Image: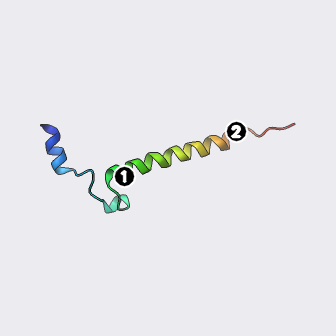
Amino acid sequence: MGNRVIDGFYNSRRIQKRLGYLSPVEFEEKHYADQATTERTNLKSRQPALTS
């Protein structure tokens, strides 16, 4: 029953200006996708260069 009040007050699909005109769900998905890309890039840059 408590979730109904939150769902009525907080619309997870409504576009939000402060989130770059994305819905909260879309914003969160983009955030985690961007974070995963950044982590992959950081891992590549941390690998030591091979020297002979």
Q: Quadrant of the C terminus?
A: top right
Q: Nearer the viewer, mark 2 or mark 1?
A: 1
Q: Quadrant of the N terminus?
A: top left
Q: Position of residue 19 (x, y in %)?
A: 36, 58
Please tell me whether mark 1 sits on a helix, a strand or a loop: helix
> Callout 2: few (<14), some (14-19), or many (20+) C-alpha neighbours within 10 Å?
few
- CA gap, disc 2 to disc 1? 33 Å
- Amino acid on which disc 1 is placed: Glu
Residue lying at 55% horizontally and 47% vertically, measured from the top left:
38
Please tell me whether mark 2 sits on a helix, a strand or a loop: loop
Q: Reply above or below: 23 against 2.
A: below
- Return the residue at label 2: 47
Near-viewer residue (48 or 15): 15
User: In the rendered view, does 48 fall on the left or right side of 19?
Assistant: right
Residue lying at 27% horizontally and 53% vertically, measured from the top left:
13
Marks 2 and 1 close (CB-CB < 8 Å): no
Q: Position of residue 3 (x, y in %)?
A: 17, 40
- Return the residue found at the far left: 1
- Amino acid on which disc 2 is placed: Gln
> Callout 1: few (<14), some (14-19), or many (20+) C-alpha neighbours within 10 Å?
some
- Return the residue at label 1: 26
Q: Which mark is residue 35?
A: none
Q: Reply above or below: 16 against 46.
A: below
Q: Position of residue 36 (x, y in %)?
A: 51, 43
User: In the rendered view, does 46 fall on the left or right side of 14?
Assistant: right
Residue lying at 33% horizontally and 49% vertically, measured from the top left:
25
User: In the rendered view, does 30 fall on the left or right side of 23?
Assistant: right
Q: How many marks on residues?
A: 2
Q: Position of residue 4 (x, y in %)?
A: 14, 42
